[in-house]
Image (cartoon, rainbow, N blue to C red):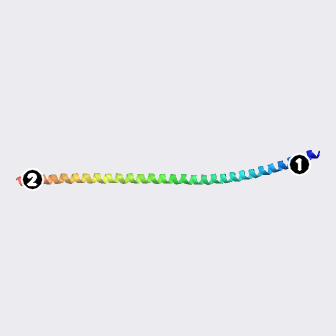
Amino acid sequence: MLKNLKQWFKTKQQLIHKIKVLEKHCRIVNDSFLDCSELYNNLSKVLEKVKSENINLQAQLHNQQIQYENKISGFQKIIENQSNDILALRAKLEKKRQRYFKKGKK
């Protein structure tokens, strides 16, 4: 009976030891989980910030693209008007030249 009692205490001590070891591992796993959860939350915040900045940069790029297209259209219109002015001046000059040569022939 003493042997059974010793065996029982030994088994009980082993169980207590295993429970303590398991509790320690549970605390470690829980701490790791909390660290991972905090990291995940931080990464989520960073990702949202990056998405927001990306949207803002795309909007800025789109606005700049529209501004440059408008500037190009404006320059094209200026060039077209100057080209028309040059053609009109050339036509006037040609008329004056023809009149001059006609007067010189008379």
Please report the residue visible at 28 percent of the width from the left and 53 percent of the height from the top.
81
Residue corresponding to mark 2 = 101
Mark 1: secondary structure = helix
Residue corresponding to mark 1 = 9
Mark 2: secondary structure = helix
Please report the residue visible at 9 percent of the width from the left and 53 percent of the height from the top.
101
Nearer the observer, 72 or 4: 4
Please provide percent x and percent y for residue 84.
25, 51
Task: Tell me: 36 left or right of 101.
Answer: right
Task: Tell me: 73 left or right of 105.
Answer: right
Q: Quadrant of the N terminus?
A: top right
Please report the residue visible at 8 percent of the width from the left and 52 percent of the height from the top.
102
Nearer the observer, 12 or 69: 12
Seen from this angle, which residue lies furthest front? 3
Nearer the observer, 97 or 49: 49
Seen from this angle, which residue lies furthest right? 1
Please provide percent x and percent y for residue 65.
42, 52
Task: Tell me: 68 left or right of 81.
Answer: right
Please provide percent x and percent y for residue 74.
34, 53
Q: Mark 1 belongs to which amino acid?
A: Phe
Q: Mark 2 belongs to which amino acid?
A: Phe
